[in-house]
Image (tube, rainbow, N blue to C red):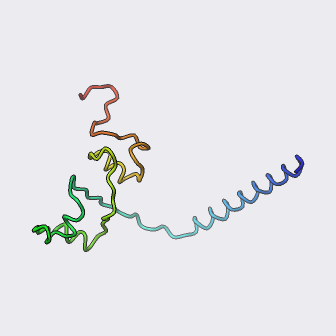
Amino acid sequence: MCVAQMFHARSMACALLAMLALICGTSAASLPASPPITVLLISVDGLKPEAVLNAQAHGLTLPNLAQITRDGVYSSGVHGVLPTVTYPSHTTLLTGVSPAKHGIYANTTFDPFNKNS
């Protein structure tokens, strides 16, 4: 492919991307605004899902947690991240990435000037 053909192909690709962006932008702008969604994430440190999902088998009565699982959404497939401590685990739940990516490895508070140790 010669330089002129490469330039033409690149120009065409840019033009197509610009048209696509324009089409997507106008169609998204014409959609009615949806109401904001409120999410409440409840995490109980050290509580395994089966303790709630099979409460009776464990001799437990957990009416409030049972109602939340009936009326809300829950996950029984969450895998703990290492280290399995609160801040890294909660940050992983909220961001969807591991501690290696989000950088929270322990339950220490953000203290860049070392004033709260």
Position of residue 71 relative to residue 10, above or below, is below
- The image quadrant that residue 72 belongs to is bottom left
- As drawn, the residue found furthest toward the bottom would be 70
- Is residue 74 found left or right of 67 in the rendered image? right
Front in this rendered view, residue 79 or 38: 79
Position of residue 2 relative to residue 73, above or below, is above
- Is residue 78 found left or right of 58 in the rendered image? right
The quadrant of the picture occupied by the C terminus is: top left
Q: Position of residue 18 (x, y in %)?
A: 71, 57
Front in this rendered view, residue 8 or 53: 53
Q: Position of residue 47 (x, y in %)?
A: 20, 57
Count of all numbered marks drawn on residues in the image? 0
Q: Residue at x 68, y 62 (%)?
A: 20
Q: Where is residue 87 in the image (x, y as percent from the top left)?
A: 29, 45
Position of residue 12 relative to residue 28, above or below, is above
Q: Residue at x 26, y 73 (%)?
A: 71
- As drawn, the residue found furthest toward the front would be 57
Q: Residue at x 34, y 49 (%)?
A: 81
Q: Where is residue 19 in the image (x, y as percent from the top left)?
A: 72, 61
- Is residue 21 found left or right of 116 in the rendered image? right
- The image quadrant that residue 110 belongs to is top left
Front in this rendered view, residue 7 or 40: 7
Position of residue 20 relative to residue 32, above or below, is above
